[in-house]
Image (cartoon, helix red, strand yellow):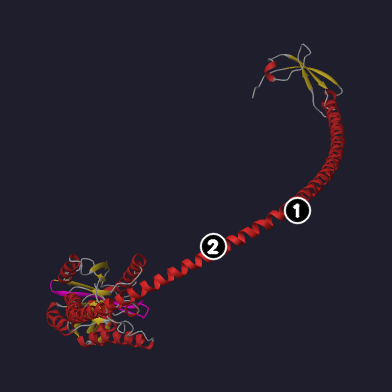
Amino acid sequence: MVTDKGVSLSSLLGGVAQAIAQAYAAGVWVKVEVTKVDSRRGHVYLELAERTDQGVAIAQARAMIWSSTANKIIPNFERVTGSVLTAGIKLLVRAKPTFHAQYGFSLAIDEIDPEFTLGELEARKREIRARLQREGLFDLNRRLPPPWDFNEILVVVPQGAAGLGDFDAEARRLQAFGVCAFEYVHSRFQGEGAAFEIRTALLKALASWSGKRGNVPDGIVIIRGGGAVNDLAWLNDYDLARCVCEAPAPVFTGVGHERDSTILDEVANRSFDTPSKVIHGIEQMIQQRVAEAKASFEMVSQLAERTLHHARSAISQRDAEVKSGVHRVLGVARDTVFSLTAEVRLSAMESVRHAAETSREALHEVKQETRSQLAQAKEKLPALLTQVRIEAHRILQDAQGMSRTNFEAAQERAAHQVRNADAQVKRTLSDVAREAQQKLGDARARSEALIREIAGQGPQKTLDRGFAIVKGADGKTVTSASDVGEDSPIELQFRDGSVLAKTTKRKLS
């Protein structure tokens, strides 16, 4: 007989359900993070978790919001927070633990506190803001001077994002007219890891920009299209905010709506509510610079026109003064020229007469001096010729003596060199003969050794080492197995005698 021992599983689980129902007769406010949301027939099914600061899940549970409750609490939550109930959002919910024998443990949610979610988002922004302020980075990008004009802009946007049509249309129009160029890079803007992807895409684009252009863009634009407010929470990231603070160019953001902002809006050089307002702000700056340039051009033109008018008046006045002065100076100069011409003529005639008299006297003196020097030269010429002959004879004798001396020295050097060459040849022949005799002796010794080695390899030596010589019936040495047939007589010669044998089977390798 089987002993009726134990209780059924349904009884046990029913007891657990009853115990939980008694322990939690009323709902309990619980802080949770939503990891999954699913709606079916008006009911909302959730998967909840609690995570550490490192993102490790330490508790998980299933929950549901029945349709009658969901129709009341979810619209109110979304209206107050501007957020959509989706994965990644943190909530403070009032939940009643329930246990079912078939479906297990779950939480039935009947209320959501929207103020908690708003506080969580704001608390995260306060934490990032305080850290950036402690590190002296918070207003780093805001202190950058705005660009004087826009020529090239880097734009970070989600891939295929809706709501960017106005920005893209205006950007294309500015680019088509050569006013400003826009370069786009794409990244996810929501979901786990979105902030890291934005930062990576921005840093990679800036490095590429610097490598290709050697500078930085005039501005960096970070924009996203429409979406729920809780989607903005992914942008409240310290590393991404620091990247914006340290950006080398002014950053302009357009990632939220009028009443929503992220930490990026706070640290950016300038923030806008929407992407369309970002491009509008850029256009306003360009229009302002165009207006300033136009005003400056008009001012310069007016100033140049006034200056030209004053210059023309001054030139006309100076021209009249110059003409009047020229006429006056010409009259005085004409009178002076007439007076000076008369004086020059008189002075020239006097100079000519004086020069003629002086020339005649000088010519007479030159003739007399020439006659005197010619006579003296004729007297000195014979003595000079004799002196030249004597000096030439002496130089000729010295040259002859020097030639004989040099010839004898050359003969002596040539004889010495011949003697040295003869001695060198004799020494070389002696060295060659000695080396030839040495090599001949070495060759004779090696030949004798080789002959001795060959002689030591005779048949008897081979037999002494334990080998045998095979001979056929004709007495000739057999060196190959193919030379011996089956049943053939052979003779095996050993060191100490011979043995007659007969083959039985031939095996060839």
Q: Please state which amino acid type lies under the numbered disc 1.
A: Ala
Q: Is residue 312 rendered magenta in the image?
A: no
Look at mark 1 in the image and give the residue it sits on: 383
Secondary structure mostly seen in magenta is strand
The magenta span reads 41-61
Res 475 seen here: yes
Label tally: 2
Closer to us: 366 or 70: 366
Look at mark 2 in the image and give the residue it sits on: 363
Q: Is residue 71 left or right of residue 255?
A: left
* Residue 374 image point, x, y percent: 65, 56
Q: Is residue 53 rendered magenta in the image?
A: yes
Q: Please state which amino acid type lies under the numbered disc 2.
A: Leu
| Quarter of the image that includes the N terminus | bottom left
x 69%, y 54%: residue: 378
Q: CA distance from mark 2 to mark 1?
A: 32 Å
Q: Is residue 312 left or right of residue 446?
A: left
Q: Quadrant of residue 326?
A: bottom left
Q: Quadrant of residue 73?
A: bottom left
